[in-house]
Amino acid sequence: MNANNKITILTNSQIIFNGFLYILKNINIQTDWHNLDIANYDFDSNTLYIIDSILLHNDSVIHNIKKNSNKKLICLQTTYINKEILNYFKDFITLSDNSEVIIKKIQNILNQHDDNLESDENILSDREIEVLKLVVSGHQNKEIADLLNISINTVITHRKNISQKTGIKSLSGLTIYAVLKNIISIDNIS
């Protein structure tokens, strides 16, 4: 993990912040707490933000979260939140998650951004994205080859590259990846 990383908890609750401090006591990362209006907040790329869902109360806040969805944002689900809004976050934490799950989610996001091999938008080529869309919508290799006017071997190569680049081998995992990266809409899943 990058030494410049820090965690900011955006919540109105001192209890929630103290809970995170307790859970994160063994991780050597600066953690602070803010109670601020996030509608116009400029999120820093070196900071992981854990945002209490109770703060996601209006369209201007949601718009700012959407605009900053490439940043390190985790939603703390303390209230009901629309699944579509969750797509703007890298991950989410629920009140029932245990310490290990919370730490793992935080470390995964921090490590993901520290690797910085390629930005999320450029990890897959345009053709690989086309193949991924067809794979998650249930098409077989032959159908994909016919639809894209390429050989089956090329489809298989694209699928191998997709699995290598994302680290995901299962169809369900690829589907979740495609939804989280806004490659497909959750409504398009059959």
Image (cartoon, grey):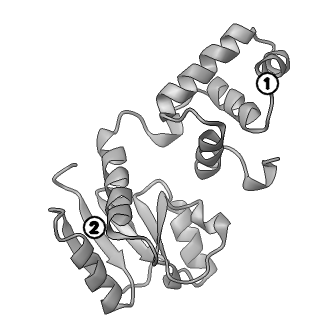
Task: Please provide percent x and percent y for residue 104.
Answer: 34, 57
How far apart are labels 1 and 2 at the CA level? 43 Å
- Asked if residue 161 is positioned above or below residue 44 in the image, the reply reads above
Q: Report crowding for label 1: few under 14, some 14 to 19, many 20 or more residues within 10 A (C-alpha).
A: few
Q: Nearer the viewer, residue 190 or 121?
A: 190
147 on left or right of 8: right
Q: Report crowding for label 2: few under 14, some 14 to 19, many 20 or more residues within 10 A (C-alpha).
A: many
Q: Which mark lies nearer to you, 1 or 2? A: 1
Q: Nearer the viewer, residue 34 or 96?
A: 96
Q: Which residue is mark 2?
A: 7
Looking at the rendered structure, the kind of residue marked 2 is Ile
27 on left or right of 88: left
Is the residue under label 2 in contact with that under label 1 (CB below 8 Å)?
Answer: no
Looking at the rendered structure, the kind of residue marked 1 is Gln
Image quarter for residue 50?
Answer: bottom left
Task: Please provide percent x and percent y for residue 32.
Answer: 23, 76
Residue 140's disc is: 1
- Asked if residue 22 is positioned above or below residue 66 in the image, the reply reads below
Image quarter for residue 114?
Answer: top left
- Total label count? 2
Task: Please provide percent x and percent y for residue 134.
Answer: 76, 32
SS for callout 2:
strand
SS for callout 1:
loop
